[in-house]
Image: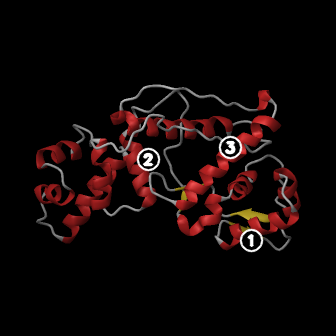
Amino acid sequence: MNTEAYYLVKMREGLSLKQRINPHYSLRAYARDIGIHPATLSQIINGKRGLPFKDADFVTKKLNLGPKEQALFKESLLQKKSSLDTIKVSAEDTRVILDDSYYRIIAEWEHYAVLELFNLENFNRTKEEVAAKLDLTNNRTDVVIANLKTAGLIEIDEEGKLIKVHSDVKTTEDISSQALRDSHKEALQLGLSKIESVAIDLRDFSSSTLAVDLSKIPEAKLIIRDFRRKMATLLSQGEKTEVYQIAIQFYPLSNVKEYKQ
């Protein structure tokens, strides 16, 4: 298994592809093309220094990376800094990333909840159990399952049993998306209802108010993502009987307009 940081692998790969087409293509030319000083790029490629996070967006665009590659590229930049504890998350990433063409899958909470039901112990993979577990009407269950089937995320076998096609599904991050905005709104509304309907020993709502340095926001977001993945790793161990949602809120209270690095 390759233990090098993902961003470094992709940057070296970018240089290799250029040199495959043109054997005379130099590191200096590569530095020019991706907008990094040649001396700095040499140190990065040789593992002597890291790529500054502020350059991540520009470099990923120059390397023509797709949404999943962009996400992994950025995550790997701050992976060491954002390591919270001893929980180990698998280095292998098999997530399928959805974009706005899957609007309903992303925006409406029931779709991800159905996909997560497959990870429960003794889930018998029927429409009836989906409806019972998620407290959905039969009609709503049919619609959600049809959406997932059309999206290629589930299949139905000859016995009418549901089959999950991909082991893990996620959305893009740090990319403007109406579907994601609507999904976050639904998560907030669900949270409000759960405060009243779920016993306190089965839920947790907490918040902190703090003054921040805006230059630390990218690293803070990576820590939040690292935390989410480690929570998923922790809670996936043992006997799984219920589906939960974790929604972390992190936003400015002061009247910030824009931050320029």
Residue 134, compared with residue 255, is above or below; it is below
The local secondary structure at tag 3 comes to loop
Residue 109, compared with residue 81, is above or below; it is below
Structural crowding at the residue carrying mark 1, measured as other residues with C-alpha within 10 Å and reported as few (<14), some (14–19) or many (≥20): some
- Label 2 to label 1: alpha-carbon separation: 38 Å
Label annotation for residue 1: 2
In primary-sequence order, the first of circles 2 and 1 is 2
Find residue 135 and report its horizontal and vertical position in percent. Answer: 85, 52
**In this rendering, the label closer to the viewer, 3 or 2:** 3
**At x 31% / y 49%, what residue is drawn?**
56
Find residue 164 and report its horizontal and vertical position in percent. Answer: 70, 61
Find residue 249 and report its horizontal and vertical position in percent. Answer: 56, 38
Label annotation for residue 229: none
Q: How many marks?
A: 3
77 sits to left or right of 141: left
Structural crowding at the residue carrying mark 2, measured as other residues with C-alpha within 10 Å and reported as few (<14), some (14–19) or many (≥20): few
17 sits to left or right of 167: left
**In this rendering, the label closer to the viewer, 2 or 1:** 1
Label annotation for residue 245: 3
Q: Amino acid at mark 1?
A: Ala
In primary-sequence order, the first of circles 3 and 1 is 1
In the picture of the structure, the residue carrying the numbered disc 1 is: 146
